[in-house]
Amino acid sequence: MKNRMTKVSLIAALLLFGQSSYSQTAEVVTASELQQRITNGSEDIQIVNFWATWCGPCIKELPFLERITTEGRPNVKVLLVSLDLDLDPDRDKVYKFIARKNIQSEVLLLDEPDPNSWINKIEPEWSGALPATVIINQKTGKRKFIGHALREGELERYLDEIQ
Amino acid sequence: MLSIVLGLTLVSWSNTAYDVGDTVSDFRLKNFDGKMVSLSDYNGSKGVILIFDCNTCPYSKAYNDRIIALHRTFAPKGFPVVTINSNDGEQSPGDSFEQMVARARRKNYNFPYLLDQTQAVARAFGATNTPHVFLLERKGKNFVIAYIGTIDNNSRNGSQADKKYVEEAVKALLEGKQVTIQKTKAVGCGIKWKDA
């Protein structure tokens, strides 16, 4: 019964938000597909955040990223790249998390073996440790890498710098 | 202004961190059994497989048996494992000294699991992840970094890893050869630094 209720509310949520919201779903991508998404983003400025459902500091900083999305800033897009599949192939865990937290930013599930072969291609400054965030201005080519958990106000400050 | 100073400090940390080929400074830290352990205690070995690790990180859990196996395989050949926990116990209570003792006893550690309370050793090495391996080769009284990175290329399942970086590197050193892959990266948990 509870399951059916969840399904009904899921469908309702999908109908409500339609294509304007990414909540409840996440596209599975390879490393090269992710690279494409990062370099050919729909908005001028992309905030790409690397996270996982098991990562405490990632979940703590999530509201800062979600705020950017829900504020509807022009020319800014937040992409939440889950690395959950690197350790555990269970996609449902991530889908459930997205639904439970009602995540509004677009979530991608990276499914790519052998991290040493792709981490440097995605971001040379990144050690592979979670969380990590990179802000890219596609117009100017400026990049800002943040190798620690975001603090209150930090994203806004870097966005001002990179505009 | 504060952010500029912080930024510069962060840059200088990463710039002064060790790289492959560097000689590392000695350190002295408390082991889970209460005794102090120094790197210089290993002056009789061919080297040390130094691993920044912790209790709570799912990657540390996934690699725990592989770390124990590395010690079992390579300690008799002169490359024992030494693990260090640098996570701030306040931010990550599961990584407190008491929890370290519990983990080491439960898993019958016959190698050190050291507490880096000030995080100075992790800073000096430039450790960022858990687990994060620094393979050290002893040259006279010095320990020189031969490899920095991850254990293998399959976190989910070690038996499916087709690149066993640490194993290959230690074998190369044992045969007096150059380590071919000297640096790797892997997804992992960030070290839980104390609030600045």
Image (cartoon, helix red, strand yellow):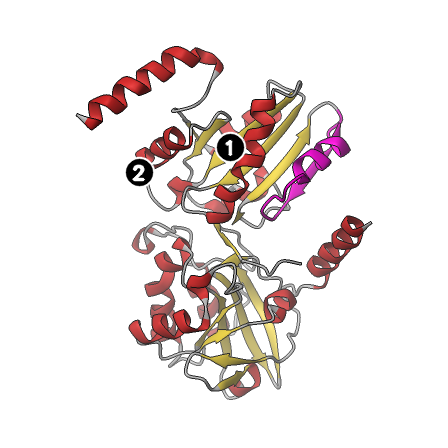
What residue is shown with label 2? A90
Q: Residue at x 40, y 31 (%)?
A: A98
Give the image location of residue A94, x and y in percent: 37, 35
Of the 4 image quadrants, the one containing the C terminus of chain B is: bottom right
At x 46%, y 69%, the residue is B170
Query: Upstream in the sequence, badge 2 or badge 1?
Result: 1
x, y percent for residue B30: 51, 81
**Quick check: B89 left or right of B68?**
right
Q: Is residue B103 magenta?
A: no
Label 1: how many Cα within 10 Å (few below 14, some 14–19, many 20+): many
Secondary element type, mark 1: strand
Task: Name the residue type under label 1.
Answer: Leu
Q: Residue at x 64, y 46 (%)?
A: A125
Q: Is residue A93 left or right of residue A3?
A: right
Which residue position holds label 1? A80
Q: Residues within 10 Å of mark 2 (few under 14, many from 20)?
A: few
User: Which sits in the foreground, A147 or B75?
Assistant: A147
Subunit bearing disc 1:
A
Disc 2/disc 1 C-alpha distance (Å): 18 Å
* Residue A76 x/y as whole percent: 64, 23
Q: Residue at x 65, y 34 (%)?
A: A135
